[in-house]
Image (cartoon, rainbow, N blue to C red):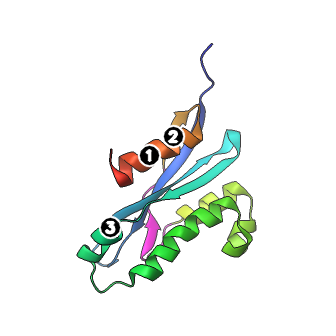
Amino acid sequence: MAEALHVFEYAAVRVVPRVDRGEFLNAGVVLWCRPLDHLAARTALDVTRLRAVAPDLDVDAVSRHVLAWEAVCAGAPAAGAAAAEPPGVRFRWLVAPRSTVVQTSPVHCGLTADPVAELDRLLRALVTGP
């Protein structure tokens, strides 16, 4: 018997060193699977690459902001008020359009039987490579 497939939504977490230029470096993925009530983010910021494209950027601050996405998704109390919201609300808050250094791509969707494995696959495909 085939595994049941579930709709999921995801967005790449991006670092945009200069918002006016629109150039970005993917630094993670946030994934929401409503049928399974699964919200998670995985990040892998390439600090060397970021320093090469944006030498004046406060990379330590950006690293903290990127890691905060994982904490918000996990509902960690230290992540602030947004982390206390229901998972679907957290996802919508995270992927809302913004003009900040850390933001997301447009939201995409797909089908998966395993959102954890899907998040790993997306991180490799969009951020870390094979």
For marks 2 and 3 on the same chain, the one whose residue lies earlier in the sequence: 3
Q: Which residue is mark 2?
A: 118
Kindly identify the amino acid type of the residue bearing the numbered disc 2: Glu
Residue that numbered label 1 is attached to:
122
Does residue 58 sit above or below 28 in this rendering?
below
Q: Quadrant of residue 90?
A: bottom right
Determine the CA span between mark 3 and mark 1.
17 Å
Residue pointed to by mark 3: 24
Inspect the magenta stretch and tell me whether residue 31 lies in it. Answer: no
Is most of the magenta stretch helix, strand or loop? loop
Q: Residues in magenta?
A: 97-107
Q: Residues within 10 Å of mark 1 (few under 14, many from 20)?
A: many
Q: Quadrant of the N terminus?
A: top right
User: Left or right: where does residue 26 sit relative to residue 67?
Assistant: left
Residue 96, quarter of picture = bottom right
Q: Could you tell me which secondary element the residue under label 3 belongs to?
A: loop
